[in-house]
Image (spheres, rainbow, N blue to C red):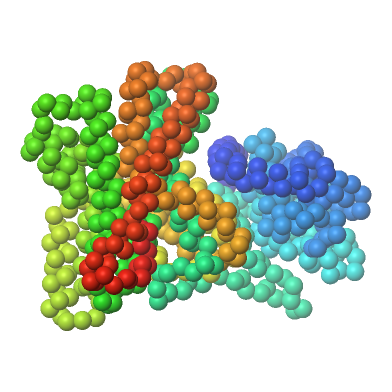
């Protein structure tokens, strides 16, 4: 049996976590309800709780204000339902505010569903005493079994009689069984079954003439012959948007860490600073997204071109131009800032020493040797990930050559070269390569998901990101953290591969925003550290106070300046990447114009 204390503790933790994770969704739904029809956002109804104590249950309002006057039962396609209400009821989103009832102690996550007093009066006395001995719940086996209860009642000549004679006795059997068998494992199983039922677009249906249950429609995976995305594919604007947001998250995290004291050093941090620290603490997750998307774009484009003439040559040109058209001017900018801040002495140039400002360090960073043979140039620590990617750009073609049909000697030589190269790399580089390869594989997968499944996938992905944030996972991947990062990457790919297709006209705002952010995301990632250091030196280097709300405005202004300067810096360099590639390829083909390769923007 499950003790009341442990069940209550589980309910509080889970309800709090649910409210935090679902807060953006709850706000959107509340705004939709308010805009769609007059009346309050929440609907409160009297229900019977534990030991017969009445309480007010919270739901999102799905009907007009006086709809209850026409009856307590709600039917499928009920004409009283609002436009938003029909969607909320179909996907059970109207039940989410009951997390507040759980926090108040009036309900539990799992338990017999609470009824209105009118129907509790129809419980047999012995059953009533047993069922009301536990707290009512948001979900239970009866709620899963009768997920389409409104459809059943709609077809009945007398809905109330059908409820009392056909539905309620079955529900009571479920309630009694739960009370007698309840345990933590039972609760977890019911919660999992609830999520599983909601993920199926068709859910569980009892609408057949013979009462048989129709099967659910499960997700279907498809293997694509190429990774190119069409005009209707939702993945394309999502990838662009996520690239930009990931770079913005990294810049925001590093700026906050640079100008504010560490959260662990504060005894009583203000609420706004707690929120800022939490919201800008997803840099590790953003880097994982970077690696997954790099594998998708770079690996996917090479897979598309493999076997074509000049495929490896064009691939090498694309990779070198992508890196160096940003790195070379960025290093010049860092040199100028180093001279301006006094970190670099022009009278004492450094050539071959192991300092962050030496010529050897600069050349080593261009070749991807930072963190391996040389330090990162100018102390620009985000450059570590570029070293990793540089080696992935070399490793992946070797793997493709080793696995593609062809001469045995060529395949063996490519495999041996890949093994030799991998053996020279650090364990962290190799582990991140697992994530990168997942992205490359994801470029060839598509999942046919229902709308609820897609929304649930993004919700679970966000929950895992928050769990990683709360756990403080912000360092390199190692054997201990690899499972969590692989799970996070897999969920991200599930969402991305199942994003579906949309009308291009409906995607225009997202395409415009994604194109803008992705256009200078690499520049922002590379130059934000020297820019924020220069900006901080200009302000005198005094740390911001985490207890002064005005510091938030200063931080926001600094972030806006860094992002704006990065955008301006990208215009003569990163923005010209495609033009430079075409120029080089035209020169290599004797002046003949060649079509841009797939994934050239990557």
For the image, the number of numbered tags is 0
Look at the image and tell me whether residue 99 can be seen. yes
The furthest residue to the left = 352
Residue 79's place in the image compared with 5, above or below, is below
Residue at the image point whose x is 26% and y is 46% from the top: 327
Q: Is residue 428 left or right of residue 26?
A: left
Residue 542, x across and y down, in percent: 36, 17
Residue 432, x across and y down, in percent: 29, 53
Residue 310, x across and y down, in percent: 24, 73
Residue 162, x across and y down, in percent: 85, 65
Q: Is residue 202 left or right of residue 408?
A: right
Q: Is residue 473 left or right of residue 182?
A: left
In this rendered view, identify the residue nearer to me: 535 or 133: 535
In this rendered view, identify the residue nearer to me: 306 or 335: 335
Residue 89's place in the image compared with 39, above or below, is below
In this rendered view, identify the residue nearer to me: 11 or 303: 303
Q: Quadrant of residue 45?
A: top right
Q: Quadrant of residue 247?
A: top left
Residue at the image point whose x is 49% and y is 61% from the top: 235
Q: Quadrant of residue 98?
A: top right
Residue at the image point whose x is 46% and y is 34% from the top: 560
Residue at the image point whose x is 13% and y is 54% from the top: 424
In this rendered view, identify the residue nearer to me: 292 or 50: 292
Residue 532's place in the image compared with 14, above or below, is above
Look at the image and tell me whether residue 47 can be seen. no
Q: Quadrant of the C terminus?
A: bottom left
């Amino acid at each position: 049996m499950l003790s009341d204390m442990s069940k209550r503790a589980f309910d509080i933790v889970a309800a709090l976590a649910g409210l935090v994770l679902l807060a953006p969704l709850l706000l959107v739904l509340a705004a939709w309800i308010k805009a769609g029809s007059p009346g309050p956002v929440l609907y409160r109804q009297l229900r019977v709780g534990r030991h017969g104590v009445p309480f007010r249950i919270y739901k999102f309002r799905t009907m007009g204000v006086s709809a209850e006057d026409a009856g307590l039962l709600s039917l499928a396609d009920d004409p009283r339902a609002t436009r938003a209400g029909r969607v909320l009821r179909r996907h059970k989103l109207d039940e989410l505010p009951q997390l507040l009832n759980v926090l108040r102690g009036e309900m539990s996550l799992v338990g017999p569903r609470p009824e209105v007093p009118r129907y509790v009066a129809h419980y047999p006395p012995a059953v009533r005493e047993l069922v009301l001995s536990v707290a009512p719940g948001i979900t239970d086996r009866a709620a899963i079994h009768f997920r389409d209860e409104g459809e059943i009642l709609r077809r009945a000549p007398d809905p109330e009689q059908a409820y009392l004679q056909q539905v309620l006795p079955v529900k009571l059997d479920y309630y009694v069984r739960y009370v007698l068998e309840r345990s933590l494992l039972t609760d977890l199983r019911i919660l999992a079954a609830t999520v599983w039922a909601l993920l199926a677009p068709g859910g569980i249906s009892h609408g057949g003439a013979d009462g048989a249950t129709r099967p659910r429609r499960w997700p279907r995976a498809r293997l694509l012959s190429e990774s190119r995305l069409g005009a209707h594919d939702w993945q394309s604007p999502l990838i662009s948007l996520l690239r930009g947001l990931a770079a913005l998250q990294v810049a925001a995290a590093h700026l906050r860490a640079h100008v504010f004291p560490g959260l662990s050093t504060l005894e009583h941090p203000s609420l706004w600073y707690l929120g800022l620290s939490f919201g800008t603490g997803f840099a590790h997750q953003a880097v994982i997204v970077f690696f997954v998307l790099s594998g998708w774009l770079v690996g996917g484009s090479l897979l598309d071109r493999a076997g074509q003439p000049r495929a490896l040559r064009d691939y090498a040109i694309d990779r070198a131009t992508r890196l160096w058209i940003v790195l070379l001017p960025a290093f010049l900018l860092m040199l100028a800032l180093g001279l301006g801040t006094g970190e670099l002495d022009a009278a004492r140039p450094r050539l071959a020493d192991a300092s962050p400002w030496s010529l050897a360090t600069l050349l080593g960073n261009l070749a991807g040797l930072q963190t391996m043979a040389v330090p990162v140039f100018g102390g620009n620590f985000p450059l570590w990930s570029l070293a990793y990617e540089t080696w992935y750009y070399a490793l992946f073609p070797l793997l493709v050559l080793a696995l593609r049909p062809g001469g045995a000697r060529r395949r063996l030589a490519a495999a041996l070269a890949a093994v030799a190269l991998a053996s020279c790399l650090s364990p962290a580089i190799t582990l991140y390569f697992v994530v990168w390869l997942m992205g490359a594989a994801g470029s060839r997968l598509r999942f046919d998901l229902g709308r609820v499944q897609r929304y649930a996938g993004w919700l679970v992905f966000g929950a895992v990101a928050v769990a990683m944030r709360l756990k403080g996972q912000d360092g390199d991947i190692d054997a201990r953290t690899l499972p969590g990062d692989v799970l996070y990457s897999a969920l991200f790919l599930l969402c991305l591969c199942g994003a579906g297709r949309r009308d291009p006209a409906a995607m225009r705002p997202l395409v415009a925003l994604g194109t803008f952010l992705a256009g200078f995301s690499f520049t922002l990632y590379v130059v934000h550290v020297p820019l924020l250091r220069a900006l901080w030196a200009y302000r005198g280097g005094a740390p911001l106070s985490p207890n002064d709300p005005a510091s938030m405005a200063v931080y926001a202004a600094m972030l806006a300046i860094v992002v704006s300067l990065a955008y301006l810096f990208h215009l003569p360099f990163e923005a010209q990447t495609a033009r430079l590639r075409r120029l080089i390829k035209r020169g290599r083909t004797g002046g003949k114009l060649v079509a841009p390769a797939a994934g050239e923007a990557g």
